[in-house]
Structures are given as C-alpha cells and as structure tokens.
Image (tube, rainbow, N blue to C red):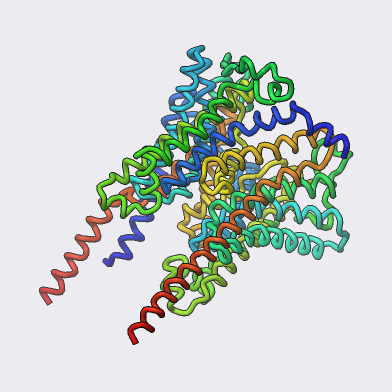
Amino acid sequence: MNTKNIEKRFQVLRTLLAIGIAMIVAFIIICFISEEPLETIRSFLIGPLESKRKIGNIITNLTPMLFVGTGVCLIFSANQTNMAVEGGFFVGAMLATVAATCLHLPTGIHTVVCLIAGGLAGAAACAIPAFLFVKFNAKPVVSSIMVNNMCLYVGLFVINHLVRDPAAGFMASFRFDETAKIGEMISGTGVHYGILIGIAVLIAGYFYLNKSKAGYEIRTVGRNVDFARYSGINVNRVITKAQLIGGFLAGLGGAVEVLGMYNRFQYQALTNHGFDGIMIGIMAAYNPKLLPLAGLFLAYIRVGADSMQRSSDVPVELANIMISVIVIMIVAERFLYKMKHKRIVAAAQKELEGKAEA
Amino acid sequence: MDRIFAAIFTPEFLFSVIRVSTPLILGSMAALICNRGGMLHIAFEGVMLSAAFFGMLASAVTQNIILGLLGAVAGGLLISMLLGYFNLVLNSDRTLTGIALNTFASAGTVFALYLLVQDKGTSSSLPSLVVPNIDIPILKDIPVLGTVLSGHNALTYAAFLTVFITYIIIFRTPLGLRIRTVGENPNAAASVGINVMKIRFITLAISAVIASLGGAYMSMGYLSWFSRDMIAGRGFMAIAAQNLGAALPLPSFLASLAFGAVTALANVLQTLNMPSEIIQSLPYVATLIGLGFFGYAAQKSGRKRTKAILDKARAAEGEKS
C-alpha cells in the first residue's frame, strides 16, 4: 500500500468521522432541548423520506447545489479562493429574470436564452476577482467578497428599477413569461427539469476536470503553480478560464433556481447558495465525482431539520450548525494527522523490509 | 437634487454618519491588527455576530452593562479562538475555516435565540441593556459641532479611542513590533526567538476584543436588541475599509468613515425614494479599484527594484571587465 492510497483513505476516514462527530453533537443538542428526543431524532433522520413532497424537497434543495458545487470544484481546484460564486448566483438569477420578463420568445428558446444570460452574468461576477489576481496580484479572498456585495446591490438596482412589478404588493419583479419557466417534472413535488440540467452539468464538469487536458492543467496549477509554469502551462490563462467557467455555472444555477422554483424574482439579500456550494465542494474535496454525495447529504439534513422543526421544538438552524462543524473538521489538516503519519511510516518500513529480503 | 443637498448638509446627517461608522471603525481596527500579524481572516462577521448575541444575553441576565460588554468580548473571543485553534494548531485553511465559522455563528445565534425567546427574528422580549449615550460637557453647547460630535454612544467614543490605541499598540510597543515581525516573516521572527504561535494567538485575541466591541455596539447601542444576522456584512466591509486604508490606522479610520457616509447617504436617499442601490455598491467598487491600484503600485515598485539590482550587477560586471 503506497502513501497516496493511505492519504486518500484517511481523507475518507476524516470526512466520515467529521460527519459522525457532527451527528453526535446534533443528537446531544436534541437530547438537551427536546422533550421527546427519540421522536425528534426519528423525524430528523427518517422524516425526509416520509412523503413524496419531502423527497421532492431534497431534490429541489440539491438542484442549485449541483451547479454551484461544480463551479466551486473548478475554481478551487485551481487553488483560487474565489467566493464570488455567491454574487454570481445572485446576478445570474437577476439577469435571467430580466431576460424572462423583458424578452418574448417561443417556448424552449426563451428558457435557453435566460439560462445563457444568467450564466454570462455569473461569469462576469467571477471574472472580476480573476482579473484583479492575474493582472494586479490582488488576492481573491477579499476582492471576491467585495464582488458579492457589489453584485447584491447591482442586482437589486436592476430588479427594483427595471423589472419591478408595482402591483405585486411587495418587492418583486414582474411574473416570468410562461415560455421562460422551467417546467415541473414530477407534479406535486416541486421537482423541476433543472435537476436534469444539473446532473448534465455535473457529469460534464467531472469529465472536464478529471478527464480532459484542460482539467489536468487546472489541477496542476492548483497543486503546484511553479511546476505548472515550468512545464509550460499558461498559468494566468488557466486560472482565468477556471473561474470564468465556474462563475458561468454559478450564474446558471441562479437562473435555473428562479425559473424553476418561483414565478417572480423576490430575493432581497444574498441567498447563501454560493457558500453552500463552497461547503459541499470542500466536503467532496473539489472532486465532482463525490459532489452529489456531499450535496445529497446537505440537502437531506436541511430537509430533515425542517421536518424536525415542524414536529418538535428544535430549530432548523441545527442543519447549518452541523454542516459548519463538519467543514471545520474536514479542512483541519492535522486532524488525525498522527495516525496517518504512523500508517505511512509503517507502510514505508514494510516496503523497505520487503526490498531488503528480496 | 435640492432635496438631497438639504438632507445631507445638516448636522444630523453628520451625526448619523458617525453613528453608522462606529462598528466599521472598530471592525477595521480589528482587521488591521490581524492583517499586520499576518492573520487576516474573514470570520469577523462571525466574531461580531457572536459578540452582539452574547452581549445582549449577558446584559439581560446580569442587568449590568460592564458584565454585558464582558459577555460580548467572551462571545467574540469564542469564535476567534476557535479559528486560532483550527488554523494554528490543526493547520487548516484560514479562509475556509472562516466561512464555516461565519455559518456556525449565524446558525448558532439564531438557534440559541429561538431556544431563549421562541422567536427567530429578534430578542426584543428580553430585557437587555443599552450602553448609555454621553453628552460631552462643553462641546455639546457649541452649535453645529456639538450636534455632530456630542451625544453619541459611549462605544462610539471608545471606537475613536481605539484608533489611537491601535496605532500605539502596533507601532509604539514591543508587542506591536513582534506582531508586525511575525506578520511579515514568521520564519525570521522564529529565528530570533519569538514564539510565533503565541504572538499569533495574541494578535487574534486583541483583534477579537476590538471587533467584539463593534458587535456589542450593534445590539447594545445601534439597536437595543439582537436580531438575526444583524452584522449584515459589516465584518466584510471592515476588512475592505482596512484594505482601502492600506493597514494603517488613520487611513483605515477615514475609509471606515467614508463607508459609513455612503451607507448613511443610502439611508437618506431611500427615505427620499431615490435609487440607493448604486450608492450602496460604491464602497465595494472603490475597494476593488483600490485593490487593483495597490497591486499595480506594488508590481511597479517591485519591477523598479529588480531593475535597479540588475543595473547594479551589470555595472559591477562592467567594472570587472
């Protein structure tokens, strides 16, 4: 067994252990505050599977995560901590709304135009930190947060002054044209065709990142930028490309979410979908292959916490507490480090002994 | 247009600028200290939120303002020390841990709020206290200046004082020298016998105390209750202000005031039914331009330096031959 295998195995172990610890923490909290802890835990764990509606909720929760998560995989694989996917999601939803309310096109084409508009807006949002990094060496950590806030206000400006429906009674856009909306796939569940687009995006993202030359370049740049430069990769171009595509996917996610789930644009603040995407991206170790698992997990505990809140007195925020605990432990490199180190040393010794005998 | 000017050129407007700037000033000083110590993180949002919550809670339970503020500081330190432990001891990525801690603080405070008052919105049913406003004796009788500068919350004056204290700590004390050394080159600092880990924890702790006062101001001054996610991006704004101020106390302070002025202006425009969103986005656009500009300047000076070294080397070679 070589070092790489042990590293991989420990990463899986660490993730599972983090999930286990978060579960235990959640159960302890439930036991403290719930009057019927067993019943509460049951509705948390099994609740999401109880009705067609709730299973549908898991899928609708998962849909935007697939887009943003795939985008995050691309961006973070290039070792760029660009959080502008949050703003990209928002402006993606915004520009798709503009296209869905102002343009009048035949069914099908209209949806595609809206989705592309959303994607382009998202790409534009992520392009700003990429540009600042490539041209001026400004770290994307700070610049992308600024971009998020900028996106919020620019998006609200467009919605409130261009497509606001004064008759809605609250701050919202005009109704989307029926031709633009993404139809419901399974009636009565809210599940819309966006999930199919999401799966397609995920698979394409997997092949692009893990099986193509361009994806290999992105991962090489992410792992060791100097090595990439010396082996003749145009580092700046690769970094920019990864972020443009990632931003496009985030914007696409925003477009799919509003067109599939709502009749009007009614967000008044950032939606946190971008940070959700980052969370599941971390859980999946930026590998699109593991992304559906991480996404399903997050969607499942969200719906579980929701069903728990309805049947007991434990607030739904428990899901977010759990996911943050998990992420904190997964990114802690030294967590289980000693055990891993021992294993690697033992394996190396064994190998050496084997060689000595031969 | 006249209505806007009529609304802006009043002492009351300047008063409100200082009022909304207070958490930004405190936050930017906290970010500045972290940046100087090479520990700039994005969990200020969580630190301030946790401080706002615990400040409210401690003051409601003890009915004592000092204990309330101490509670706020404890709440801020909690998040900050968690970040320190995971980042410094367990070697995790600071930004990713920061994202997770912000989520943790946001969810945790709402969770606890619901358990306390069965309300996920605000804590207004809890009898929490407010830090008193202070009228400055002679100043308050001067016509315009008095209206602008007097009668603020005690924490606002503390914020002004903090700018000065930050300058003293960072540039005029041995501790500040250590913090800056560790920030610029941890290996060099370790080689002269500085305990890098300890200095970094101290950096985090000092900055958390300052940021906590900013958080406490939100729930015990700006408003008299805690409401969910009440920091609303001010932690990020503080980082931006500090960046715009190039990690120097006075410029960062001025940048915070500028951010506050823009926010106050947006509030005024909103009441006049004017498009306030573009104005609200201005601080962020300014920061982005600032980031680009600083990067450009650093690159240029770097190139100049390289060129100077090259020229020198060439000259030396020429002399030899």
Q: Position of residue B2 (x, y in %)?
A: 88, 37
Q: Nearer the viewer, residue B224 or A310?
A: B224
Q: Position of residue A56 (x, y in %)?
A: 64, 47
Q: Residue at x 40, y 49 (%)?
A: B183
Q: Residue at x 43, y 27 (%)?
A: B74
Q: Residue at x 51, y 64 (%)?
A: B301
Vertical order, B159 against B182 (above or below)? above
> Which image quadrant is residue A50 in?
top right
Q: Position of residue B281 (x, y in %)?
A: 70, 46
Farthest residue toward the bottom? B321
How many labels, in total? 0
Vertical order, A48 against B66 (above or below)? below
Farthest residue toward the top? B63
Q: Is residue A45 visible?
A: no
Q: Nearer the viewer, residue B176 or A28?
A: B176
Q: Residue at x 46, y 23 (%)?
A: B71
Q: Nearer the viewer, residue B275 or A257?
A: B275
Image quarter in which the C terminus of chain A is found = bottom left
Vertical order, A153 against A73 (above or below)? above
Q: Is residue B141 visible?
A: yes
Farthest residue toward the front? B319
Q: Position of residue A210 (x, y in %)?
A: 49, 70
> Which image quadrant is residue A1 in?
bottom left
